[in-house]
């Protein structure tokens, strides 16, 4: 399909621009479908070898299958995997019981912040897409974060054509979003075309499947009988249910997602 | 076919509402979203608005205005990426960010208010961006009791404005985004109108691709196994294996030995392709490659039209200019004319200084750079100006001064 080729071409261009413009980029990988496709695009952009580290944020609340999947792909694809954990919060047993907003902020955003401070990454490649969430639809391809990790969404840079703003100051970093223009359906069609590995939890068992993967306590299944990629693609062509409908942090209250993202959440 | 549509126009003329209506009537809204918006409307003590499908920031709902650009997609005869942009002057840089990717523009003008400041400015800017296909939605016809005269009066004035920018034979559609007239469904309330409704106009869009000379942009050189792979993108034309090519500004000259992608080789690459090449010469990031019979040319001075989005600019200032992957130092040699971005009229000859939101014809003196006339090869005829951040954008009118 020529459309997938256009999407891929643009994403590869963006990934190469990020690599050329920043000193220490890294890519974030949740093991989900979008970030796995992003890793694959990174492999393709650099002809097989991802030239920067791959970060996985481990909240310790991830599904058991995700850890197995993560370690297998890391081994097979041969990249440098870094695991980000907020050890202090994990030690005290911090979790969703302390509030979903607080939990996401401590175990995801803060874990990532610590990793960036330690490794001095100046760019983070992330797999967010416009069609996932209204707030993500407002993003730029290159989106700066200040030293407090904050997203100043009220004053985003001018980003015309393929001229991404790449100036960074000390202690800040830029989020790079090479998949911003992809739809959920495109990701699945690309996964099928490229034969990418798929997390088994996306496939239906007993009439239920996960459509978006997060932490075990805050991720719900949807009703579905789609047990193969082909069936998932067929399902997406007719569904009217939002992709992240099974993700608690998106809809706990109005604008929870905006508040999370303003603080540096993905 | 994928078509990028930008919806432009003055604040409160109904851009976000129009897109919300398109999504809603084409059944592109996910389950629960309507209820979610009803809940939000109650929480904010406001009435249900289609615009709330687009305006996702807390502040946008509170202030009832769009702050930043949004992209949404829906499927009609084509797959549409529709871009919403803010209608306030203070957010012009967000408007341009959204509009720079568009193939087609829909100018929304309220039949009640007629032409306002951003009506003209947005039309001027999309014209500068080279968007040739423009439709006009005369909106809020419900407030005008769907009277043909109201449509005709507004159409006449907007038509004059657009003609001055060089838009001719524009389709004007009377409608109401709020009530859903002539957006996705033909209205029975305006039997006097028999032209295309908005979705029909969009479905009739054809995007032309013209044959152009080869321009390949170098992003980087990677060491892969024992080869130096020149990574980059074909911006126009076709690149063939075995061809003799030349890179400028460096002047590196050689032969294409291989065209490579991960896990394979290609005989040729077309415009838009992100590829790698192995050649008998060593270009560098920022080089532009062409064939020997139609090579790119290096210049150090060119004439362009630019709009300033942040900060101020005066003759003699030195900024950075970015065009494709080229980054060069650039002196504002001479500001020839200041242009009113609301009307397109020349308002001052040889002005000393430009401020935010002003447009001008400028002679740029730069380090060695390859540029093309924007009307010939747009990918190499557009640039941004950088001073601590992206402050302005422009297009190349003449490749020499």
Image (spheres, helix red, strand yellow):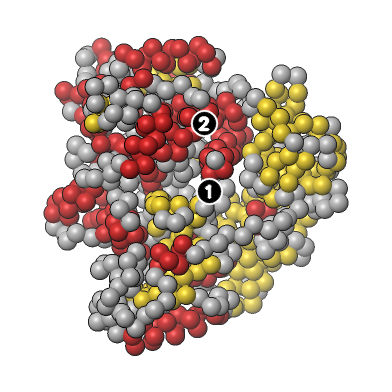
Gap in angstroms between the C-alphas marked 1 and 2: 39 Å
The quadrant of the picture occupied by the N terminus of chain A is: top right
Give the residue displayed 67% in from the left and 61% down from the top.
Answer: B374
Q: Residues within 10 Å of mark 2 (few under 14, many from 20)?
A: few
The disc at residue A234 is: none
Q: Secondary structure at mark 2?
A: helix
Single out the mark in the foreground, 1 or 2. Answer: 2
Give the residue displayed 41% in from the left and 28% down from the top.
Answer: A229
Question: Is A262 on the left-hand or right-hand side of A172?
Answer: left
Image position, residue B321 (x, y; %): 64, 51
Residue A244 falls in which quadrant of the image? top left
User: Does B366 appear above or below A228?
Assistant: below
The quadrant of the picture occupied by the C terminus of chain A is: top left
Please state which of residues A201 and B128 is positioned toward the viewer in this rendering: A201
Mark 1 touches mark 2? (CB < 8 Å): no
Give the residue displayed 22% in from the left and 19% down from the top.
Answer: A94
In the rendered structure, the residue with mark 1 lies on which chain?
B
The disc at residue A193 is: 2
Please state which of residues B246 and B141 is positioned toward the viewer in this rendering: B141
Q: Residues within 10 Å of mark 1 (few under 14, many from 20)?
A: some
């Amino acid at each position: 399909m020529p459309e997938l080729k256009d999407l891929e071409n643009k994403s590869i261009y963006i990934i190469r621009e990020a690599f050329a413009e920043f000193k220490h980029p890294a890519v974030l990988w949740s093991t989900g479908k979008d970030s796995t496709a992003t890793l694959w695009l990174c492999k393709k952009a650099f002809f097989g070898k991802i030239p920067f580290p791959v970060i996985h944020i481990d909240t310790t609340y991830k599904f058991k299958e995700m850890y197995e999947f993560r370690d297998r792909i890391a081994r097979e694809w041969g990249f440098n995997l870094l695991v980000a954990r907020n050890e202090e919060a994990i030690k005290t047993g911090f979790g969703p019981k302390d509030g979903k907003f607080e939990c996401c902020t401590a175990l995801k955003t803060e874990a990532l912040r610590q990793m960036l401070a330690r490794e001095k990454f100046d760019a983070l490649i992330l797999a967010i897409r416009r069609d996932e969430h209204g707030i993500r639809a407002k993003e730029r391809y290159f989106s700066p974060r200040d030293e407090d990790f904050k997203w100043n969404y009220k004053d985003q840079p001018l980003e015309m054509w393929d001229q991404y703003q790449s100036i960074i100051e000390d202690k800040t970093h830029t989020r790079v979003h090479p998949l911003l223009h992809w739809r959920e359906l495109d990701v699945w069609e690309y996964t099928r075309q490229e034969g990418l590995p798929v997390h088994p939890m996306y496939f239906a068992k007993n009439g239920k499947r996960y459509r978006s993967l997060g932490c075990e306590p805050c991720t719900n299944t949807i009703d579905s009988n789609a047990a193969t990629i082909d069936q998932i693609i067929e399902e997406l062509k007719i569904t009217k249910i939002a992709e992240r409908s099974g993700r608690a942090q998106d809809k706990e209250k109005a604008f929870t997602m905006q508040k999370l993202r303003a603080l540096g959440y993905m | 076919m994928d078509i990028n549509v930008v919806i432009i126009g003055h604040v409160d003329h109904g851009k976000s509402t129009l897109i919300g209506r398109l999504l809603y009537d084409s059944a592109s809204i996910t389950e629960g979203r309507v209820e979610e918006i009803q809940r939000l409307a109650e929480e904010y003590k406001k009435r249900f608005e289609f615009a709330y499908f687009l305006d996702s920031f807390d502040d946008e709902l509170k202030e009832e205005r769009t702050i930043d650009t949004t992209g949404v997609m829906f499927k009609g005869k084509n797959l549409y990426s529709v871009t919403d942009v803010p209608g306030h002057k203070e957010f012009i840089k967000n408007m341009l960010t959204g509009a720079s990717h568009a193939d087609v523009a829909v100018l929304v003008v309220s039949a009640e208010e007629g032409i306002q400041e951003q009506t003209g400015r947005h039309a001027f800017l999309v014209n500068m961006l080279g968007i040739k296909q423009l439709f006009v939605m005369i909106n809020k016809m419900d407030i005008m009791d769907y009277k043909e005269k109201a449509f005709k009066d507004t159409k006449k004035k907007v038509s004059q404005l657009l003609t001055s920018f060089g838009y001719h034979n524009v389709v004007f559609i009377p409608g109401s985004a709020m009530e859903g007239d002539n957006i996705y469904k033909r209205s029975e309330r305006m039997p006097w109108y028999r032209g295309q409704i908005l979705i029909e106009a969009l479905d009739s869009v054809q995007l032309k691709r013209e044959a152009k000379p080869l321009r390949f942009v170098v992003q980087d050189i990677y060491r892969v196994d024992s080869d130096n792979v020149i990574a980059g993108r074909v911006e126009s034309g076709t690149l063939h294996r075995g061809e003799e090519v030349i890179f400028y500004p460096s002047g590196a000259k050689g032969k294409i030995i291989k065209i490579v992608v991960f896990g394979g080789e290609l005989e040729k690459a077309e415009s838009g392709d992100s590829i790698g090449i192995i050649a008998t010469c060593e270009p560098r990031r920022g080089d532009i490659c062409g064939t020997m019979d139609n090579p790119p040319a290096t210049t150090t001075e060119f004439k362009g039209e630019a709009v300033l989005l942040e900060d101020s600019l005066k003759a003699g200032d030195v900024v950075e200019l970015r065009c494709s992957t080229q980054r060069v130092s650039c002196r504002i040699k001479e500001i020839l004319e200041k242009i009113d971005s609301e009307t397109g009229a020349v308002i001052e000859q040889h002005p000393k200084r430009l401020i935010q939101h002003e447009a001008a014809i400028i002679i740029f003196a730069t380090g060695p750079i390859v540029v093309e006339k924007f009307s010939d090869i747009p990918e190499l005829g557009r640039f941004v100006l950088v001073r601590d951040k992206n402050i302005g954008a422009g297009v190349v009118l003449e490749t020499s001064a």
